[in-house]
Amino acid sequence: MSEPITSEASPPPPSTTTPSAPAPAPEPTTFAASPSISASASPSASPVASTSAADASDPARPLSKNQQRKLRRAAERAALKPLKRAAERERKKERKRKAIEENDTEVLERIRAKKRRPAKGERVDTGVKVVLDAGFDDLHTEKEIVSLSNQIASCYSTNRKTTHPTRLLLTSFGGQLKARMDQNAQSGYANWDARAIDIRTEPYEALWGEKEGEGENEPVPVLEKEKVVYLTADTEDVLDTLEEGHTYVVGAVCDHNRHKFLTVNKARAQGIRAAALPIGAYVQMASRKVLTVNQVYEILVRYLEKRDWKEAFYSVIPMRKLKEGQGQGQGQEGAEGEAEADVEDGTEVREEKEVGYGGEEAAGEGLEEKEEAEKAAKAVAE
């Protein structure tokens, strides 16, 4: 009787071990439920990749510090814009009041001239062509393209209002610049007067020739290669005058001086003359500064009006860019400190020597760029 009892008592030990055998099974199940451990256990999985993929697919992903900073600055600029406009209006009113009190007829005449376009009989055919060469589009950042589009609008406005207009051409128009101007409703460039600016998609070298071609609506301009001058600082050849029948090319470059010798190398490769404006002979700069594309164009126009380089330079270059004591008594816009044409980028002035093209203003002058953008848009609207 004891043996049967013993034989039946022996099975319980296996039964106690039997439940313990599957006990390890829950452990893998627990590990598999942990994404961090399972990802690290798999050699092909990357925690960084999985995190970035999740961030990219998540529309509510938090902005980076850089993006937050950009948005904050944009909001600050938008908030300051009405205040800056009001301050500029007050400054203009104060200048006008002062001119009236002092009976400064020169300043008053200049104020009146700015507010109206010259009549047909007042316009003089200078016979001079000026090309804004936008063939460096791929070298610009988005911010630089914004600056460049504002400067081109200012050039257009200057040519409409002067009594001595040039045949102004914008060549190689496309890419980022066109996209920006298409996007910016204020520019309204599609409605610009074709007599004040001729916008062309082809590069200026495609216009080499001896006589005007025939276009759909108007003659295609021709540029006589031997009479084309590329304005650049990187040459010892200094321009003496602007000649009728000649074409002067201004590099529409806004690259923070990242790319050196762009314009002079282009001129040499094309076998055309490269020359510098004679700034060093008339003006001493306070430091290594920048003239913008629209400032260079305005200098050319003012020279055509007066045939006086010194007066042209002092009427355009802001007072703060001149060495102390210069510009006093000139009675010009530049001497008054009106940096109205002062937009970021364009044309570099080598101290006391020459003007170059393809630089940009210091970052601290960014506010002036915004003011000029507003001025350009207002001028075009008029």
Image (cartoon, rainbow, N blue to C red):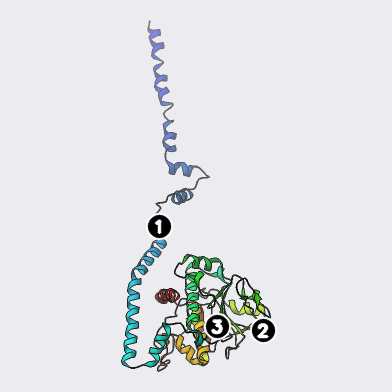
Q: Earlier in the sequence, mark 1 or mark 2?
A: 1
Give the number of the mark in front: 3 or 2. Answer: 3
Q: Nearer the viewer, residue 107 or 172?
A: 107
Locate residue 116, reporting x and y percent: 43, 82
Mark 3 to mark 2 CA distance (whole Å): 19 Å
Q: Are marks 3 and 2 in contact (CB under 8 Å)?
A: no
* SS under mark 1: loop
Task: Tell me the residue at 41%/29% (across/down).
Answer: 23
Q: Residue at x 38, y 9 (%)?
A: 5
Q: Residue at x 67, y 84 (%)?
A: 226
Q: Residue under label 3, please give it.
A: 166
- The residue at which mark 1 appears reads as 63
Q: Which three-letter amino acid code belongs to the residue tagged 3?
A: Thr
Q: Compare residues 230 and 86 and report the one nearer the observer.
A: 86
Q: Mark 2 is on which residue type?
A: Glu
Q: Is residue 83 left or right of residue 3?
A: left
Q: Earlier in the sequence, mark 3 or mark 1?
A: 1
Which of the 4 quarters of the picture holds residue 69? bottom left
Whether residue 273 appears in this view of the structure is: yes
